[in-house]
Amino acid sequence: MKRITKTLLILLSGGITITSCNNASTPANETTKDTSAIVVAQPMDYPYKIDKPDNWDMGSQQNTMNALKALKAWETRNYEESVKYFADSVQLRFDAYEKKVSNDTLKAIFNRDASNLKSAVVKMEDWESVISKDKKTEYVTLWYRQYTENNEGKKDSVDVINDIKMKDGKIIGLDEYRRKLH
């Protein structure tokens, strides 16, 4: 019995060695395709129900560029340039403020707020552009830390998330969420 077990072990380990070294289907100079990034959609039973779960696809890089250029122009206090990326009217939603404003009013808001601000610096963390599967709704979301100094020299910093609604390459909505840092 011991002899049969020993013989089986030798045969099995030899077979495993031969199988693990056999790459006849892939020549040494040929690379194999990386399939680690393939995502297969599967039905999910989420604990919350919404009308359109998993409704988003990757959005436009140009929308991302326009949103970033608008923010960069605001950061450098070039409000004339910043508002070029906004539509004729824009829905604004900030903490304790919600209003639809014209492009001219938006520029006036930027200028008014800047009168109390000595400087602003944005340290971008990430962004994402998405479009609904029916291609009717587009957003760019920006995540960044904003450092400011007011005219009296007081410095402050906040983490900011901007959900920017886009239409035809223009910003038509801006929802801003802030978390004050210590």
Image (cartoon, grey):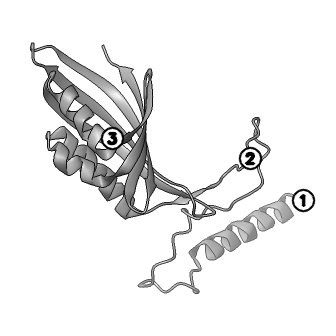
Q: Nearer the viewer, mark 3 or mark 1?
A: 3
What is the secondary structure assignment of the residue under circle 2?
Answer: loop
Q: Earlier in the sequence, mark 3 or mark 1?
A: 1
Q: Nearer the viewer, mark 1 or mark 2?
A: 2
User: Most extreme residue toward the right, as rendered?
Assistant: 1
Find the distance from the CA under tag 2 to the CA under tag 3: 30 Å
Task: Determine contact: label 2, label 3, CB under 8 Å.
Answer: no
Is residue 141 in view from this perspective?
no
Residue at 62% x, 71% y is: 17
Residue at 21% x, 41% y is: 74
Q: Which residue is mark 2?
A: 51
Given residues 156 and 100, the one toward you in this image is 100
Which amino acid lies under the numbered mark 2 shown in the image of this protein?
A: Asp
Q: Which residue is mark 1?
A: 1
Given residues 101 and 17, the one toward you in this image is 101
What is the secondary structure assignment of the residue under circle 1?
Answer: loop
Q: Which residue is mark 3?
A: 125
Image location (x, y in percent) of residue 21: 57, 75
Given residues 116 and 140, the one toward you in this image is 116
Residue at 45% x, 84% y is: 30
Query: Is 84 on the left-hand or right-hand side of 151?
Result: right
Which quadrant holds residue 117? top left
Residue at 63% x, 76% y is: 18
Find the distance from the CA under tag 3 to the CA under tag 1: 66 Å
Q: Considering only vertical position in the picture, is 150 above or below 147?
A: above
Which amino acid lies under the numbered mark 1 shown in the image of this protein?
A: Met
